[in-house]
Amino acid sequence: MDDLRLLDTVERYIKGEMQPDERVHFEQLRKTNAEVDQLVVEHTFFLQQMNRFGEWKKFKSLLSNIHVDLAEKGQINSARLQGKAKVVYLWNRYKRVSAIAASIAVITTLVISSLVWIIAPASPRSQFEELNKKFSQLEDKTRKQAKEIDRIKDKATSVPQDIPFTTGGTGFIIDAKGYLVTNAHVVEDAKQIAIQNNRGEYLVQVVFQDTERDIAILKIEDENFKPYSSLPYGLSKQTAKLAEPIFTLGYPRNEVVYSQGYLSAKTGFNGDTLSCQIEINANRGNSGSPILNRKGEVIGILNGRETNTQGFAFAVQSKYIFDVIESLKKESSSRTLRIPSRSSLIGLDRTEQVRKMQDYVYMVKVN
C-alpha cells in the first residue's frame, strides 16, 4: 500500500467512513503494525489542528461581519477602521481571547506529542527475510522414519540416512530430464543436497548459481530417478498483472502446503525490479516455491518476506529464469535443457491443478 492510499485509508478510518468489516481489518492492522498505529495518532492530531484553524477562520469572518454591520448602523466610524487600523482595533479588543486559545493549542500539542512518544512502541525498520528453514532434531528423526517406510514401499531413495541435513527450502522441476530451480540462498555453501516428495528422494547437484537474481539450477544425479514424460505447467516470460490471483506449493513443513493470494506490486522489497510483491502466507521453507497464476503458468519463485508485516512476500520474476538458463547453456554441456512455455493446466479447477503439480515440487534439504 503506497503512502497516499494509506493516508486516505487512515483518514476514512478517523472520519468513520469505513464499512464494518473494513474497519475490523484496519484495526487489526493497527495492532500488528506500529507505524500504521502511530500514523493514525498523528493524523488525528493533524485533523484536530485543521479543525481549530477552520474555527479561527470562521471567528475572523464573524468579526469582519460584525464590523460591517456596526459601520452600516453608524455605531462606529468606519473611516477610522480602514486597512491596518481595522486589524489593530480588532486585535486590541480580542487579543486576550486569542492568547487563551493559542495557549490551549500549544499545551494540547505538547501533551499529545508526549503521549505519542511515550505510548507508541518503537517501530523497528522492516527488513527482507529469506525463507529457507532449519531442520530440527525432531524433523530429522521424522525424515529418517519416513525414509524407512519408503524403503518398505519400494520407493526410490539412495540418500544415506546418516546425512545431517540442517537447512532446506523448496524447488520445482523445469526440465523433464531432472533439472530443478530454487533460490540461490537455499543451497548456499552446500556440501550435500537432496530433494524429496511423494515420488522419491534423490541426490542433486548445483549446476549453476546466480546470487544477484537469487536463482540456482539443480540437476538430479541419482540412478533411481526416472525422467518425467512432460511438465504440466509452463514458465511465463511476462510480468504478472496487479491484483492477479496466484497460488503456490511449498515445503514449510514435512508435507507439501498450498497457499493462495494475489500480486500486490510489480516491484519487490524497496522497489527491487528483479522481483514482485505478493500478498500470500509464506513461512520458512517456502524459499524456492513456484508462484503460479490461474492458467498454471509459473510467474515467479518465492524467495522472502518483509519483517514487521503480515501477509506480504516477494518472488523473483520467472522471466529471469530464462536468462539464467541461457547463461548455463553457455558455460556447460546443458544445451539440451528446455523450459516449458505452455501450460496444460489452463481451464482446470484449482484442486485438479494442484493434484497434477504435486509430483513436480520438491523439498530441498541441504547439509
Image (cartoon, helix red, strand yellow):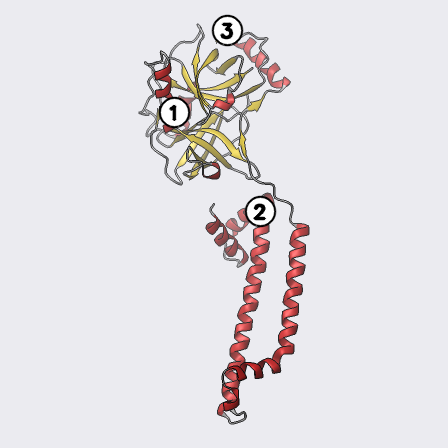
Give the vertical position of 48 relative to 315 (above or below).
below
In the rendered image, which quarter contains the C terminus? top right
Q: Which element type, helix, strand or loop, lies under badge 3?
A: loop
Residue 149: which quarter of the image? top right
Specify the label residue 35 is tagged with. Answer: 2
Give the amino acid at mark 3: Ser
Above/below status of 262 relative to 66? above
Position of residue 338 relative to residue 286, above or below, is: above
In percent of width and height, residue 299 lies at 38, 30
From the image, tell me which residue sits under label 1.
321
Q: Identify the element where label 2 is drawn.
A: helix
In this rendering, the answer to whether 103 lies above or below 164 is below
Q: Residue furthest front?
A: 84
Residue at the image point whose x is 52% and y is 52% from the top: 20
Residue 21 screen position, x and y as percent: 51, 49
Rendered image quadrant of residue 223: top left
Q: Residues within 10 Å of mark 2 (few under 14, many from 20)?
A: some
- The disc labelled 1 sits on which kind of residue? Ile
Mark 1 secondary-structure assignment: helix
Kind of residue at disc 2: Glu
Does residue 324 appear left or right of residue 39 in this picture? left
Which of the marked residues, 2 or 1, is nearer the chain's N terminus? 2
* Residue tagged 3: 158
Residue at screen point 52% across, 73% down: 57
